[in-house]
Amino acid sequence: MLKITSKKITQALESYQIHRQVRFAELFSNEDIKKLRPAAVIIPLLKVERQWSVLLTQRSQALLEHRGQVAFPGGAKESADGNLQATALREMKEEIGIDPKDVHVYGHLGDIPVITGYMVRLFIGQIPWPYKLTVNHSEVESTFIMPLEWLINPGHRCTQFRSYSGREIPTLFFEEYHGYQLWGASAEMMMVFLRALDIIN
């Protein structure tokens, strides 16, 4: 069983510095970076039978962006949001009904550019469990839980190349887990968190 405490999570976020991956430099010029729209997501941590896990969503097929993909709650910053943490918490409430007052936010892991035009700040928060979710089916098809023990297994992930704007882009894929597949930007964000905790290489 993973030996992770709330204190360790807090310390990891305080000390971790995001090193922009080489591929970001290949995908974005400095001018491109300035054009990216600010957004935020939150990785909702929870404990199931004392086992650390994460709550994820499968996005609705009706959405224009990232339809049907596995993702963390989140979205673009709106003018009424006081800051990006407020964005992440608002989006989680809208998507799956988790009240912001029920979330313990540990902090964030910096900003990550994604090829769909956003600069995403990655927050980490813990929610009580069990919790009565209220799924907004116009945005979210379903929710599911993945244990960190499963995610840290190197045999459960690989890199494949996908074509984007005429270029072959290395893309991270996790194996399917109970019919769901975590890949792309959300998979990269998951890896950032796992590396910050120093539980994977």
Image: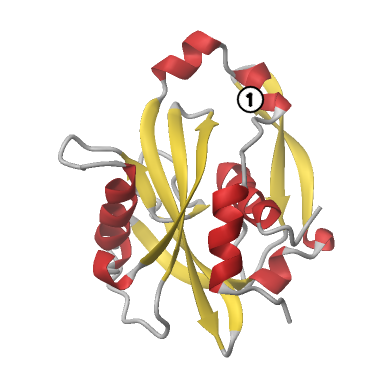
**Residue in front for this viewpoint, 48 or 71:** 48
**Residue in front for this viewpoint, 196 or 174:** 196
User: Is 184 situated left or right of 39 in this image?
Assistant: right
Residue at 48% x, 9% y: name it.
Answer: 31
Relative image position of residue 173 (x, y in whole percent): 70, 49
The answer to whether residue 138 shows anywhere in this view is no
Relative image position of residue 79 (x, y in whole percent): 18, 34
- Mark 1 surroundings: few (<14), some (14-19) or many (≥20) residues within 10 A: some
Residue at 61% x, 43% y: name it.
Answer: 184
User: Is 76 situated left or right of 55 in this image?
Assistant: left
Total marks in image: 1
Residue at 40% x, 16% y: name it.
Answer: 35
Name the element at disc 1: helix
**Residue in front for this viewpoint, 100 or 14:** 14
Scheme by which the image is coloured:
secondary structure
Q: Which residue is mark 1?
A: 24
Q: Is residue 96 above or below residue 185?
A: below
- The N terminus: image quadrant: bottom right
**Amino acid type at image mark 1:** Phe
User: Is 70 situated left or right of 96 in this image?
Assistant: right
Work out which residue is located at the far bottom of the displayed protein and give it.
Answer: 49
Residue at 34% x, 51% y: name it.
Answer: 88
Q: Is residue 15 above or below residue 34?
A: below
Relative image position of residue 87 (x, y in whole percent): 29, 47
Work out which residue is located at the far right of the displayed protein and give it.
Answer: 155
The answer to whether residue 130 shows anywhere in this view is yes
**Residue in front for this viewpoint, 112 or 13:** 13
Work out which residue is located at the far left of the displayed protein and give it.
Answer: 80
